[in-house]
C-alpha cells in the first residue's frame, strides 16, 4: 500500500536543525534523493538554538519552506541522570525556539522528532500513540522525555491555534553511522560495540553488561528512521504524533550476544547487577506507520555490521 504525496519536497528550501547529529545527518543524506531546491544547515557555533533571538534571526535569514527538527541534547541513562537540568532546559529551548520561529516566518511544513521515552514506564506493550500522558515516566530519563512531550504539544498547539502544518514523529532507539560512542554518555548499542571492540583488541574474553540483561528493547537503523521521517513529511498531516520503529524487540542480553558476534569477541556475558535495568520493556506499536505504507528495510544484523564498520573507520583508531 502506498500513500499519496501531499507535500512534495522537490524544489523546496529545507532546513535540517541538528544536521551534525546521527539522525540529522541521515536525514540530510536521505533528502538528497528528493531533489530539493536547497538544504540549509548550521553548526552550533553559527546558531545557538537554545537562544531565541539567534534562532529567530537565522530563520528570518534563510526563510525555509520545510523544517526538520532532529536537533536535541541526547544521551543514555547515565547522561540523563547526571545532567537533568541541561537535558530539560536545552531541549525545551530548542523545541520552543524553532517551532515558534517557524510559525513566525511562515514555514509551510515542519516535523518535530521526539523519542520513545515520552511514554509511561509501564505502558501496555506494544505502546500505542494514545498511551502518551497516561502514566508516570521512567525516572532515569524523565527530563528529556518532558522536553520532548512539550515539543509534541507545541506542534499541536500551533496547528490548533494558527493552522500550521506541524507534525511529530517518535523514533524508537536508533543506531548507525554517526552515533555517539562515548564510553559513559552513549546509548546501549554504540556503548556495547565500543566495549566489545576494546575487549577484543585487549585479548579479553566475554563482555560485562549493565543489569540483568532481561529488559527488552526495540532498535531501528538511523537510515530507516530518516526514510520514515521523509515519508511522513511528504504524506502525513494530522495533529497526532506517529511512532517510528521496527515493530520488533529483543533482550539486552540477546543484543549483546549479537554485538559480540559482529565484533568477533568470544566468551560469555557477565552481568553487573549493581547497575539499573531501566524500563522492563519498550516496544512501540508500528501499526499506524505500516498502514500508511512504510516499513523498515535494514535488519538488525546488517545494521549492526554497518554501525561497527563506521566505528572502525571513524572512532576506533582515535580512541586507541
Image: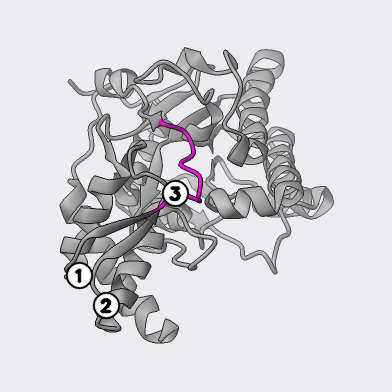
| Circle 3 or circle 1, nearest the eye | 3
Q: Earlier in the sequence, mark 1 or mark 2?
A: 2
Q: Residue furthest right?
A: 53
Spatial CA distance of label 3 from label 2 is: 21 Å
What residue is shown at x 34% (from left), y 44% (from top)?
A: 213
Magenta-colored segment: predominant secondary structure: loop
Coordinates of residue 281 in the picture (x, y in percent) = 38, 30
In the rendered view, does 20 fall on the left or right side of 156? left
What residue is shown at x 41% (from left), y 23% (from top)?
A: 236
Residue 255: within the magenta?
Answer: no
The quarter of the image holding the C terminus is bottom left
Residue named by callout 3? 273
In the rendered view, does 53 fall on the left or right side of 101? right
Residue named by callout 2? 204
Spatial CA distance of label 1 from label 2 is: 8 Å
**Callout 3: helix, strand or loop?**
loop
Amino acid at each position: 500500500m502506498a500513500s499519496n504525496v501531499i507535500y512534495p519536497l522537490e524544489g523546496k528550501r529545507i532546513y535540517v536543525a541538528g544536521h551534525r547529529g546521527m539522525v540529522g545527518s541521515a536525514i540530510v543524506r536521505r533528502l538528497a534523493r528528493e531533489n530539493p531546491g536547497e538544504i540549509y544547515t548550521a553548526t552550533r557555533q553559527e546558531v545557538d538554538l537554545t537562544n531565541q533571538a539567534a534562532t529567530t534571526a537565522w530563520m528570518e535569514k534563510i526563510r525555509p519552506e520545510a523544517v526538520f527538527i532532529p536537533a536535541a541534547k541526547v544521551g543514555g541513562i547515565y547522561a540523563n541522570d547526571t545532567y537533568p537540568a541541561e537535558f530539560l532546559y536545552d531541549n525545551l529551548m530548542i523545541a520552543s525556539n524553532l517551532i515558534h520561529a517557524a510559525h513566525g516566518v511562515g514555514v509551510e511544513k515542519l516535523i518535530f522528532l521526539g523519542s520513545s521515552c515520552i511514554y509511561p514506564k509501564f505502558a501496555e506493550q506494544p505502546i500505542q500513540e494514545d498511551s502518551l500522558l497516561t502514566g508516570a515516566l521512567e525516572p532515569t530519563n524523565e527530563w528529556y522525555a518532558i522536553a520532548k512531550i512539550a515539543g509534541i504539544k507545541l506542534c499541536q498547539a500551533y496547528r490548533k491555534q494558527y493552522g500550521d502544518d506541524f507534525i511529530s514523529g517518535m523514533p524508537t532507539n536508533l543506531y548507525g553511522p554517526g552515533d555517539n560512542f562515548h564510553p559513559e554518555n552513549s546509548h546501549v548499542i554504540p556503548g556495547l560495540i565500543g566495549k566489545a571492540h576494546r575487549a577484543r583488541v585487549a585479548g579479553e574474553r566475554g563482555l560485562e553488561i549493565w543489569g540483568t540483561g532481561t529488559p527488552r528493547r526495540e532498535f531501528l537503523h538511523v537510515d530507516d528512521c530518516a526514510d520514515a521521517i521523509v515519508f511522513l513529511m511528504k504524506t502525513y498531516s494530522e495533529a497526532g504524533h506517529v511512532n517510528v520503529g521496527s515493530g520488533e524487540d529483543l533482550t539486552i542480553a540477546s543484543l549483546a550476544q549479537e554485538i559480540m558476534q559482529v565484533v568477533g569477541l568470544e566468551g560469555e556475558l557477565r552481568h553487573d547487577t549493581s547497575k539499573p535495568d531501566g524500563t522492563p520493556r519498550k516496544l512501540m506499536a508500528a501499526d499506524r506507520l505500516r498502514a500508511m505504507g512504510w516499513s523498515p528495510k535494514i535488519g538488525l544484523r546488517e545494521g549492526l555490521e554497518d554501525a561497527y564498520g563506521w566505528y572502525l573507520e571513524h572512532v576506533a583508531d582515535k580512541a586507541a
